[in-house]
Image: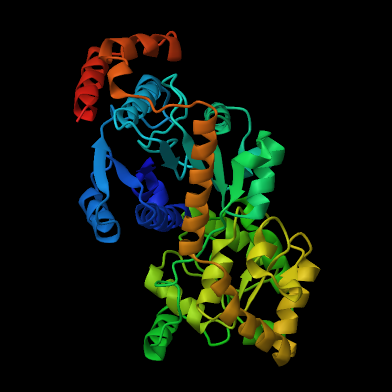
Amino acid sequence: MRVVLDFQACQSGSRFRGIGRGSRSLMLAMGQRLMEQGHEVMCLVSEAFQDGLDLLKTDIQVHLPGAFITSFQVPSPCAAAWPENAWRQMAGRLLREHAIACLEPDFVHIPALLADGWGDDAVASVGLLGLHIPVSLTQHDLIPLVMADTYMPPGPFRDYYMVKLDNAKRADLLLAISEYSRHEALEWMGMAPERVVNISSAADIAFWQPVDDSLACEATMQRLGLRPGFLLYAPGGFDYRKNLDRLFEAYALLPGEVRAAHQFVIASQLDPGRREILEQVMARCGLGHDEVVLTDYISDLDLKHLYCGCFAYVFPSLHEGFGLPALEAMSCGVPVIASNRTSIPEVLDMEEALFDPCDPHSMAARMLQLHTEPAYRARLLAHAKVQPGHFSWARSGQVAVDALEARHRQLIKEGWQPVRRMVLPDCASLLARMHALVPGVEPTPEDLAAFRACFEFNLG
């Protein structure tokens, strides 16, 4: 097979989040397995993201020697959040599909179809060109759909997301990051079971491991004003599912002497408005600034120091596709207590470490148990030393490649044949298709010129 791996998730806004890091790790693992098994690997990057592009190419070359790196251009700006970009956003999707078709692939893997493109110039689609080029997607979660009342009220983003979801349903294969995520796709997308495979996920063990530098950890704690014995939560955001309100309520239920022994540290970037809201919740719960510390932005290295210095990690999330922070914490050798919802029990695989995230009393009971029962914390600590070994990118990459090979064999049996470059539409034909895809929106002369220039660049 010739397989195209789309690396845009390592360039877009996702690159700073778990999705970006996980996408990089998965695609490098897939690429290594594909080449070991005799397949050809082509790595696709976007010229729309110049910041870090050379570093990404070098990263790919180092980890996937022998893979071919190819880039494509799209008209910019094309982020979907701005209505004036509607024509360019659709043009970018169409041009990307055409650029991929020129490579004559047997399979294309997209790691973040639903996550990117709203606020940046990432573009991705499935089947827009009208040709069957087999596509696999990493299936992370359907949180906006499942929790639509909270995350997707009627409006432009909902329309955008539903179009993306329709694209996802056209994929030949979904590679789910957990068994929960797999069942979510079956239930909410109506996918056939054989087209959704659980490949699981992993932490970057080379990064998330105990820091063997106690002085550096102590220095970070002192700089942030933390006392030994603190509890930690690094939510990576403050939306509803992160469950900060109930976490504060639960912490406030602990006896004063327990809170004095265990500060609670919330490690995540904060804008002034969000800080004010959280401080209001703290005040309502009777919590002081000496009890709950809001760190604001911290570096990855600082976060590692906090993991290695904390008494335990608390993960109260209401909904996850996998639950990577819990695995990262355990990879650092940290005891973890966590929500019993969605995919998180798969990651922990320890019943006595779980609590009901909707019940502050349940959450508080686990935190109190950590303080009053040293044997309980010791069991969690012992579990943290072995549980991460059940997850690896090598395993996820192998399961993904096995799924691609199986689906490809089935497609061949059904009579599918690769699309050849000689039958692809020319630039004029693509522009004609744009009239149907974006009815009533007229491109400017500059847009048309950019489209033609991108088309020529993408021909290679």
* Above-or-below relation of 259 to 89: below
453 displayed left or right of 178: left
Q: How was this image coloured?
A: rainbow
**Can residue 284 be seen from the camera position used here?**
no
Q: Residue 209: where, in percent of width, then height? A: 45, 77
The quarter in which the C terminus is drawn is top left
Depth order, front residue of 301/91: 91
- Residue at 76 percent of width and 75 percent of height: 352
Q: Residue 274: where, in percent of width, then height? A: 53, 54
* Above-or-below relation of 431 to 33: above
Q: Residue 263: where, in percent of width, then height? A: 59, 80
261 displayed left or right of 68: right
- Residue at 56 percent of width and 26 percent of height: 159
How many discs appear?
0
Depth order, front residue of 307/2: 2
* Above-or-below relation of 379 to 209: below
Residue 3: which quarter of the image? top left
The quarter in which the N terminus is drawn is top left
36 displayed left or right of 370: left
Residue 438: which quarter of the image? top left
- Residue at 61 percent of width and 36 percent of height: 152
Residue 116: which quarter of the image? top left
Depth order, front residue of 214/190: 190
Q: Residue 117: where, in percent of width, then height? A: 42, 36
- Residue at 65 percent of width and 35 percent of height: 191
**Can residue 134 be seen from the camera position used here?**
yes
Depth order, front residue of 199/50: 199
